[in-house]
Image (cartoon, helix red, strand yellow):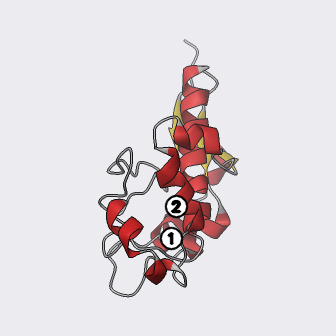
Amino acid sequence: AMSSKKKVCYYYDPEVGNYYYGQGHPMKPHRIRMAHNLLESYDLLKSLEVVGPPRASWSSMTAFHTDEYIQFMRFVTPDNQHEHTRQLRRFNIGEDCPAFDGLMNFCSVYTGGSVAGAVRLNNKTNDIAINWAGGLHHAKKGEASGFCYV
């Protein structure tokens, strides 16, 4: 009998481990890089199709999220957030979901990987899609929640 080897795509961006939620925050994107390094150490990358995640577009993010929310996420930085306390409250950007450097880049990387993975699964291009950075499923239509933004 023919063996049916699963076709696995794995989304990874080497920059993803550089994002930092801030001191004392339990969410640590650096762990994504650690997981990748383990795959490398165990020589498992050769059996995966490693793909750089495409950046999620405005239209793919606003297919679910409100324009106002995504627009604010694009705009807010650690430096300007203090001038926008009303929006921070409205969009739940704060202690659990801080405005950190490169926030929107981080979101577009992990969202892009998840959307692209879903497309590959739907098209039957792959049997399995992996995106360690993805699955941040607590985000709501118009606000961040539980360490998740998009």
Residue 48 is tagged as: none
Task: Answer above or below: position of 138 versus 20.
Answer: above
Q: Position of residue 8 (x, y in %)?
A: 58, 37
Q: Which residue is mark 1?
A: 34
Question: Dot 2 lies on which element?
Answer: helix
Q: Nearer the viewer, residue 14 or 144?
A: 144
Question: Dot 1 lies on which element?
Answer: helix
| Occupied quadrant, residue 19 | bottom right
Q: Residue furthest bottom?
A: 23
Left or right for 5, reference 24: right
Residue at x 63% of width, y 52% of height: 45
Left or right for 136, reference 1: left
Disc 2 to disc 1, C-alpha distance: 31 Å
Q: Residues within 10 Å of mark 1 (few under 14, many from 20)?
A: few
| Occupied quadrant, residue 60 | top right
Left or right for 26, reference 3: left
Q: Residues within 10 Å of mark 2 (few under 14, many from 20)?
A: some
Left or right for 2, reference 135: right
Q: Position of residue 23 (x, y in %)?
A: 39, 87
